Image: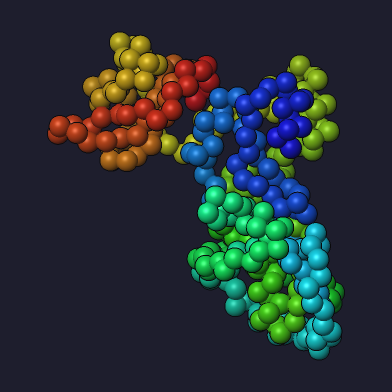
């Protein structure tokens, strides 16, 4: 998607806020131009998916992209009540072992690269949180469900673990991400729609989201005489601000500095020599509606 958008926009500087599995579809936030510099500040928060699993088979990738590693027919004995109970058991904070076919870094290599070389690495379990897990349809051996989870959750691993807890094999057959932090599928565009809108001058401005819309930081306006120093990345102080809008300084806070409609920088608050100092992290100096 990044490569495609680079060609469509004729722009090299494009980045995404989080990968999707090859089999998955759905929300993929993309940052363009100088907006790539705010990726680290965007609230990732919860992610929501619609998923389908199939009992009776497992693969080395935990989805249909991989090689079949096991089959069984024990799912035929499953009762609806036991399925519901097992799904309920995954609510809340749980430990999860990431799949071998994942982008996790191990000694300078991605795990999926090692997996393709036929190597299996022992992975430590990770703490994740399942905020909501709702069964939408049971049509054995297929179950369709909706899950809202924390960052770092692998839905393929969740499917594997559900199968194991029901004493059968399970594989993910479909995955759609409907929400990623503040970004929702209702506000997303298909690639073909995006390309069509880009060719329409009236619609082009509607598809790009202002840089600061989803940055949940205090927005503080600077005094005119601090403008040059702010745009040059100099440290600023409380006396350089025109208005605080009720903000009370706290060390390590991220804040946005602006002047009129000019989004200048993202700074971090520090405390030195008995006073608060605003240290610039990213300086933008771009006209932006804050």
- Front-most of residues 159 and 103: 103
Report whether residue 10 is seen.
yes
Q: Residue 275 falls in which quadrant of the image?
A: top left
Q: Residue at x 28, y 40 (%)?
A: 251
Q: Residue 185 vs residue 254: left or right?
A: right
Q: How is the image coloured?
A: rainbow
- What is the residue that sits farthest to the bottom in this orientation? 77
Residue 77 lies, with reference to residue 205, above or below; the image says: below
Residue 282 lies, with reference to residue 142, above or below; the image says: above
Q: Residue 197 falls in which quadrant of the image?
A: top right
Residue 132 lies, with reference to residue 167, above or below; the image says: above
- Front-most of residues 247 and 234: 234
Measured as percent of width and height from the top left, residue 217 is found at: 42, 36
Measured as percent of width and height from the top left, residue 76 is found at: 84, 85
Measured as percent of width and height from the top left, residue 66 is found at: 79, 62
Q: Residue at x 53, y 22 (%)?
A: 289
Q: Residue at x 82, y 82 (%)?
A: 72
Measured as percent of width and height from the top left, residue 69 is found at: 78, 73
- Front-most of residues 99 and 119: 119
């Amino acid at each position: 998607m990044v490569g495609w958008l680079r060609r469509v926009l004729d722009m090299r500087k494009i980045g995404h806020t989080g990968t999707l599995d090859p089999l998955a579809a759905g929300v993929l936030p993309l940052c363009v131009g100088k907006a790539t510099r705010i990726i680290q500040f965007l609230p990732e928060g919860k992610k929501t998916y619609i998923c389908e699993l199939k009992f009776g088979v497992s693969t080395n990738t935990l989805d249909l992209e991989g090689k079949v590693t096991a089959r069984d027919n024990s799912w035929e004995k499953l009762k609806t009540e036991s399925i519901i109970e097992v799904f309920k058991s995954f609510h809340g904070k749980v430990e999860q072992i990431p799949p071998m076919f994942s982008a996790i870094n191990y000694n300078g290599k991605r795990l999926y690269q090692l997996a393709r070389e036929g190597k299996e690495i022992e992975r430590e379990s990770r703490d994740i949180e399942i905020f909501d897990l709702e069964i939408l349809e049971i049509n054995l051996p297929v179950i369709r469900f909706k899950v809202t989870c924390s960052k770092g959750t692998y839905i393929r691993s969740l499917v594997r673990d559900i199968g194991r807890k029901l004493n059968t094999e399970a594989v993910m057959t479909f995955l759609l991400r409907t929400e990623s932090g503040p970004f929702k599928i209702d506000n997303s565009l298909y690639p073909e729609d995006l390309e069509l809108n880009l060719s329409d001058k009236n619609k082009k401005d509607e598809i790009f989201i202002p840089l600061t819309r989803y940055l949940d930081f205090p927005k503080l306006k600077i005094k005119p005489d601090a403008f040059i120093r702010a745009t040059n990345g100099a440290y600023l102080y409380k006396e350089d601000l025109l208005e605080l809008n009720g903000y009370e300084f706290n060390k390590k806070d991220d804040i946005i500095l602006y002047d009129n409609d000019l989004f200048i920088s993202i700074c971090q608050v520090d405390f030195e020599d008995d006073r608060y100092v605003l240290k610039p992290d990213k300086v933008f100096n771009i006209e932006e509606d804050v």
